[in-house]
Image (cartoon, rainbow, N blue to C red):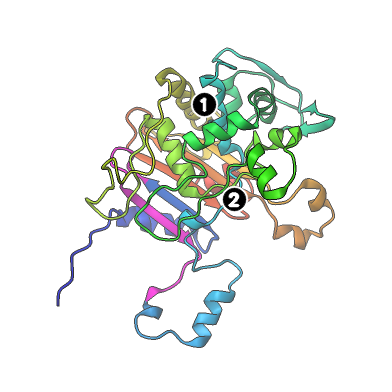
């Protein structure tokens, strides 16, 4: 008996290119059309051959899949949660602009580090970036700018804007097993860990580190909102977007068009004017994006490990972006586990 036809939104050429660029991984690429929410790419590496399950998989094959250190049965686009690193600075920038704490002219001096709450917090650039505005802070991914912004915002506002952009929330995608991630707050830490929130934790959170956990799909949707001001439900089945009010799990937040444009311009600068995202540049095509390099262990812990041990805890590399700059047609997020720098490992894939 013939069953129902099922047509996916996946673009085969793009899917094959993403899988080729990822190689053996581990990593993930997700891309979607911001106008329709149709997912064009959902690539997760390492993967497995579904033909193994067509008849009966052997015990040996099943054991290899279960025991593989890089979990090939996990769909990393939806189920792998990790810190987003500096891609989170997009969320921070929007929160600061919307709350009126910063504007396009707000300047901060970065000397390579800043002392806050009795601790020294470092920028990735040891010599510092000098005086930077928001545009330059995103372009060059200046940590100090966002440390100070986070201090002014506080954890509650950061958590609120994160959720407004869909982080820590279900996307209602038409696949099972979606991970929610974690947007930490004072209440969460008190209830779950029985501990107060410490001010220094807000500083780490401000650059996408600490307790914050997201999936590549969640970051893609957040960037899609910044790129277009809209939030269609992401879906894989052609023509079956859950866009009726009772089906939608996520509604588009109301952000200032001017503030969104400021961030888009800064993301364009990151790719096209010598910023950290320049490896994502495409000739004669307007790409905008933001890199992220997310530590998986503290620097102090890394110093106690041998070089071989430290390789297992290399930073995760991120890139989030959209193109073209005006009326974007595609939103892309790349996450390369243990890839190191987002600018060198994830941006070229994008």
The dot on residue 94 is: 1
Q: Position of residue 30 (x, y in %)?
A: 42, 50
Left or right of 18? Residue 137 is right
Say which residue label 2 marks: 82
Compare residues 271 and 302 and report the one nearer the observer.
302
Assess disc 2: are there few (<14), some (14-19) or many (≥20) residues with their C-alpha within 10 Å of its C-alpha: many
In which quadrant is the N terminus drawn?
Answer: bottom left
So how many labels did they put on this image? Answer: 2
Secondary structure at badge 1 equals: helix
> Residue at coordinates 62% horizontally, 39% vertically from top-left?
208
Q: Quadrant of residue 311?
A: bottom right
Q: Position of residue 95 (x, y in %)?
A: 54, 26
Left or right of 264? Residue 67 is right
Q: Is residue 350 visible?
A: no
Compare residues 193 and 76 and report the one nearer the observer.
193
Q: Are marks 1 and 2 in contact (CB under 8 Å)?
A: no
Compare residues 253 and 128 and report the one nearer the observer.
253
Q: Is residue 172 above or below residue 123?
A: below
Q: Is residue 252 above or below residue 19?
A: above
Does 35 appear in magenta?
A: yes
> Residue at coordinates 81% horizontally, 32% vertically from top-left?
120
Assess disc 1: are there few (<14), some (14-19) or many (≥20) residues with their C-alpha within 10 Å of its C-alpha: many
Q: Is residue 123 visible?
A: yes
> Residue at coordinates 58% horizontally, 73% vertically from top-left?
68
Left or right of 239? Residue 226 is right
Q: Which residues are magenta?
A: 32-50
Q: Position of residue 105 (x, y in %)?
A: 57, 12
Left or right of 215? Residue 239 is left
* Gap between marks 1 and 2 measured at Cα: 21 Å
Q: Position of residue 216 (x, y in %)?
A: 49, 49
Secondary structure at badge 2 equals: loop
């Amino acid at each position: 008996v013939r069953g129902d036809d099922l047509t996916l939104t996946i673009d085969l050429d793009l899917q094959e290119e993403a899988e080729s660029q990822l190689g053996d991984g581990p990593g993930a690429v997700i891309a979607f059309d911001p106008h329709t929410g149709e997912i064009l790419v959902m690539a997760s590496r390492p993967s497995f051959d579904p033909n193994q399950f067509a008849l009966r998989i052997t015990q040996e094959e099943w054991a290899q899949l279960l025991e593989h250190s890089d979990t090939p049965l996990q769909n990393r686009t939806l189920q792998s949660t990790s810190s987003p690193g500096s891609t989170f600075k997009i969320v921070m920038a929007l929160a600061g602009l919307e709350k009126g704490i910063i504007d396009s002219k707000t300047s901060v001096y970065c000397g390579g580090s800043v002392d806050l709450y009795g601790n020294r917090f470092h920028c990735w650039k040891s010599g510092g970036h000098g005086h930077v505005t928001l545009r330059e802070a995103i372009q060059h991914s200046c940590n100090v700018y966002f440390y100070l912004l986070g201090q002014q915002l506080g954890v509650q506002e950061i958590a609120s804007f994160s959720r407004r952009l869909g982080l820590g929330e279900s996307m209602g995608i038409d696949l099972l097993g979606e991970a929610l991630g974690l947007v930490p707050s004072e209440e969460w830490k008190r209830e779950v860990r029985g501990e107060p929130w410490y001010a220094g934790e807000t500083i780490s959170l401000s650059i996408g580190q600490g307790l914050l956990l997201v999936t590549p799909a969640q970051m893609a949707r957040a960037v899609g909102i910044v790129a277009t001001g809209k939030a269609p439900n992401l879906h894989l089945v052609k023509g079956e977007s859950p866009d009726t009010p009772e089906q939608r799990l996520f509604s588009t937040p109301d952000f200032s068009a001017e503030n969104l444009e400021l961030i888009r311009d800064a993301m364009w600068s990151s790719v096209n004017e010598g910023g950290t995202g320049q490896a994502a540049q495409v000739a004669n095509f307007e790409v905008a994006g933001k890199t992220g390099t997310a530590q998986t262990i503290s620097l102090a812990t890394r110093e106690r490990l041998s070089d071989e041990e430290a390789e297992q805890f290399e930073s995760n590399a991120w890139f989030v972006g959209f193109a073209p700059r005006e009326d974007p047609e595609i939103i892309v997020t790349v996450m390369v586990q243990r890839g190191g720098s987002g600018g060198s490992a994830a941006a070229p894939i994008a």
